[in-house]
Amino acid sequence: MVLIVLIEIILQFFPVPDPYEATKKNMFIPAVGNMYIESQFEPNTKLEFATEDGLLGFENYKEKTNFTINNVGFRGDKLKMPKPNNEYRIFAIGGSSTESLYVDDADVWTQVLQDNLNRDNYQNKTVKVYNAGKSGDNIQDHVAMLSHRIIHLQPDEVIVFCGINDVTRLMLDKNPLKFNSKQNVDTEIGFSQVLSIFLYEFQIPRRLYYAFKSEEDALETIEIESKYKKKVEKTKSRPIENQLPTTDYGNYANKLKTLIGICQANDIKLIFATQVVTWDTEEEALQNWHWMTSRGGVRYNAKMLQQKVDSINDVTVRESMKFSIPVFKTDSIISKTSNYLYDDCHFNPLGNKKMGDELATFIKTLNQ
């Protein structure tokens, strides 16, 4: 017992997060603040990330990278309200390809875009680009982010970079209308639940949780230091399923039109960006870093999944054309090589620079 107490005291100096922190926060007070937005960052969050050895494109990169969230929960400079008259405000909405978790604040593609546009005095104003990307977000989250979190912040332009997470949701989500599937039934809290709540206040039980959590939880967990090799190993250990679930793209198309309608009603310029995914690459180095083909406990055929992404991109282009919305065709502009991507769909530092600079050229061309 003395030894356990000593270990616990030492571990308090090297804490790991409580896996049930969110549950405890909302145990007695309803979660009113984020009931319409599933994922978000706390304002003024500051983190440091690091990447494992061998990750494609990070060989000579910074040992530690800064990931900073501003005063309103976005990656980028401090946001001022009301918006200054000399500011041209752009928001980038998307999933992890927008968020760019392991790339430094100075090198993320939204910052590259901001720097590029300011060099050319775009719109004769000071351009600010705010990164509202969040790992795992799909188009339903993008609608919530735009309508509930961004629209009142007076954006001049919005970039929506979507696609890959929608493939998973459309294939596997059995509740696309997001009905509340949990009945509000009063239940008594037993001794075991109270004991669990108590135990996870300490570091030893927390570490045991992370050591023995399920394989699927490990695949979806985002680490302070990247653990892609472990995710690749878990994916490769599963047999390949060649029969993919059928996909109805109607919900995705309707959500695209919702985003378009919100922006048009508020006189905001909108650009869609298609998704670039390396599931059909012939480069062996990239194939060896694929881990996102495993979804819902099943590893799917990579080239068949690529067809789903291509179909999503086609829907994005088709719906955009109906309303004269410009589309940045990322999947054809940025080549599917390890020069720019390090796994299934994420940009390495050079890929972030390529994305930011190419998108800046695209935006400037639209306004010539």
Image (cartoon, rainbow, N blue to C red):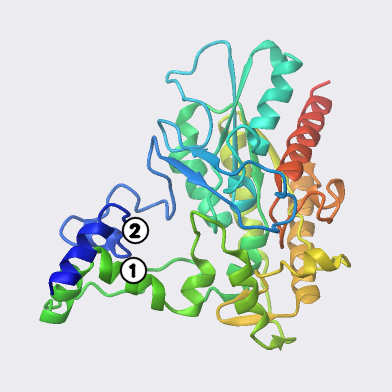
Badge 1: few (under 14), some or many (20 or more) residues near its Cα, within 10 Å? some
Q: Nearer the viewer, residue 124 or 16?
A: 16
Which quadrant of the view contains residue 190?
Answer: bottom left
**Where residue 180 sits: x, y (%)?**
36, 69
Q: Disc 2 designates what residue?
A: 16
Is residue 175 in view from this perspective?
no
Q: Is residue 186 left or right of residue 169?
A: left
Q: Write the residue at 79% across / 62% down.
A: 278
- Using the image as rendered, state which of residue 1 and residue 189 is in the foreground: 1
Quarter holding the N terminus? bottom left
Residue 329 as seen in the image, left or right of residue 206:
right
Residue at mark 1: 207
Give the SS element for disc 2. Answer: loop
Front residue of this view, candidates 226 and 37: 226
Residue 15 horizontal/vertical position (percent): 31, 55
* Nearer to me, 311 or 257: 311
